[in-house]
Amino acid sequence: MEISLEEINTRYQVPVTTAAGQVPENPSTQNTIDQLKMNPHIEGGYFVETDRDKRLMVNDAGEERSRSTSIFYFITPKTPIGAFHRNASRTVHTLHHGRGIYVILVPLGPGGSFDDFRIETFVVGHDISNGERLQWIVEGGCYKASFLIPEKEEKLESSPGLLISEVICPLSPTLLALVVHVSVN
């Protein structure tokens, strides 16, 4: 399901706060934040790290990293936007509850540059018969943003928020070479 940027901009009637947590959340949303022990996220919304693999690897940039990291990420009616940002590594997203729009900027230029790029938009939600996604993958190097949208019969202010899990999977140069070799053969 394709959604234009103009359509995204017309959905927001709630002012976006300058930092998560400045405006009190409704009791149900605040309960989720409290129960999951979430903190404000710099990109908007809230997050908590739920797992960090103790095994380490060296990523493409030569940095030592965990083999994977998992988080809960939650955008709410008071913090309805996850600002554009770029993950260095492949990230697997899984929906828990709510609905949202994701916008992905995929680099097509030489060496992954944004001299040329493709824009992907899609809805995440539970209405899979209408093309909504329960799980999606964003490759490393892409920019992504998320926008809370209401369920079909509700207003944004009464949304339960968009709660997802993200699993970040950095690739080592050796593993990347193996994946490319297996894919080609």
Image (cartoon, rainbow, N blue to C red):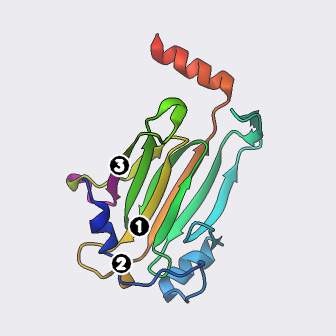
Residue range in magenta is 119-129
Q: Name the residue under label 1.
A: 147
Disc 3 packing (10 Å; few <14; some 14–19; many ≥20): some
Q: Of 30 and 168, which appears nearest the observer?
A: 168
Q: Position of residue 5 (x, y in %)?
A: 32, 62
Q: Name the residue under label 2.
A: 12
Q: Is residue 131 above or below residue 61?
A: below
How far is the residue under mark 2 from the one under mark 3?
A: 20 Å
**Where is residue 106, by image quadrant?**
top left
Labels 1 and 2: the sequence-earlier one: 2
Q: Position of residue 63 (x, y in %)?
A: 77, 38
Q: Which residue is drawn at 35% across and 83% down?
A: 13
Q: Which mark is residue 94?
A: none
Q: Which residue is at the far left?
A: 130
Q: Where is residue 105 in the image (x, y as percent from the top left)?
A: 43, 48
How far is the residue under mark 3 from the one under mark 1?
A: 14 Å
How far is the residue under mark 1 from the one under mark 2?
A: 9 Å
Q: Is residue 78 above or below residue 104?
A: below
Labels 3 and 1: the sequence-earlier one: 3
Q: Residue 120 carries which label?
A: 3
**Where is residue 22, by image quadrant?**
bottom right
Check residue 97 for magenta coloring. Answer: no
Q: Residue at x 48, y 66 (%)?
A: 163
Q: Where is residue 81 in the image (x, y as percent from the top left)?
A: 47, 70
Name which residue type carries label 2: Tyr
